[in-house]
Image (cartoon, rainbow, N blue to C red):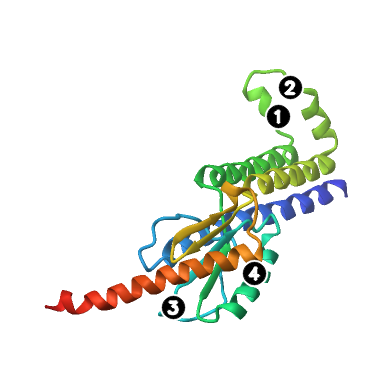
């Protein structure tokens, strides 16, 4: 009976780990295929579906990359509502910010290591004998308390993975030009600051658009 319980728990852990690895890979692949406008400035992976609040093909775009695991999606939703009310012609896009390839690979490594350790525990295999080293006491405890050891490995690994993927970012881009970075300033802009940033960028955008329109006949000559 006890062995059956261990097997069921182990299969559940395998299912969660396989889901994280497989679906994480699919999201990484789709994120690389989404960029159809030649924006190679920020090579990030999508962990959640991107959010788009406006659809003005010819209008400027405000893109916000936020830390999903930090709970900043709620801040993004609130700012999107405020900005949409004040700037109805502005496209607003949001997506999760991933903190680089190195951390992502480390998270994948932790997921695989977690799965390997649980498999060794369930199979009663002592990896230290193959390494010709003394078996530490913690491994003896884990083999004697497999259920608690598997739970400990699962939750500890998930906690570490979550911490590694928590960037604390709230990065704002206007037409792919960075205009605010929480990683640099250490804080999210207040609504008045956000409005001021957008106002200034809208003026620059309008001036550049008028300049391009005035220079268009000269280019055609």
Q: How far is mark 3 from mark 2, CA to CA?
A: 64 Å
Q: How far is mark 2 from mark 1, CA to CA?
A: 8 Å
Chain-order first, disc 3 or disc 2: 3
Instruction: Check disc 1 and report the residue beneath it.
Output: 126
The residue that appears at 82% across and 51% down in the rendered structure is: 4
Between marks 3 and 2 in the image, the one whose residue lies nearer the viewer? 3
Chain-order first, disc 2 or disc 1: 1
Where is residue 114 shown, x and y percent of the image? Answer: 68, 42
Q: Which mark is residue 135?
A: 2
Instruction: Check disc 3 and report the residue beneath it.
Output: 59
Between marks 4 and 1 in the image, the one whose residue lies nearer the viewer? 4
- Is residue 123 shown left or right of residue 175? right
Between marks 1 and 3 in the image, the one whose residue lies nearer the viewer? 3
Chain-order first, disc 3 or disc 4: 3
* Image-quadrant location for residue 193: bottom right
In-front residue for pair 98/56 = 56
């Amino acid at each position: 009976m006890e062995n059956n319980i261990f097997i069921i728990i182990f299969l559940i852990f395998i299912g969660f780990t396989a889901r994280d690895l497989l679906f994480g890979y699919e999201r990484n692949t789709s994120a690389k295929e989404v960029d159809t406008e030649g924006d190679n400035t920020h090579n990030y992976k999508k962990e959640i579906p991107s959010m788009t609040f406006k659809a003005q093909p010819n209008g400027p775009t405000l893109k916000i990359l936020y830390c999903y695991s930090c709970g900043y999606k709620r801040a993004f939703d609130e700012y999107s509502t405020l900005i949409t009310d004040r700037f109805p012609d502005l496209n607003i896009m949001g997506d999760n910010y991933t903190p680089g390839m190195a951390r992502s690979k480390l998270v994948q490594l932790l997921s695989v290591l977690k799965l390997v350790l649980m498999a060794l525990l369930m199979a009663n295999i002592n990896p230290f004998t193959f390494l010709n080293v003394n078996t530490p006491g913690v491994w003896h405890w884990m083999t004697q308390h497999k259920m608690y050891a598997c739970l400990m490995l699962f939750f500890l690994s998930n906690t570490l993975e979550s911490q590694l993927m928590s960037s604390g970012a709230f990065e704002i881009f206007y037409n792919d030009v960075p205009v605010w970075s929480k990683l640099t300033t250490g804080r999210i802009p207040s609504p008045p600051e956000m409005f001021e940033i957008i106002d200034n960028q809208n003026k620059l955008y309008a001036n550049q658009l008028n300049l391009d329109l005035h220079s268009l006949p000269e280019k055609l000559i």
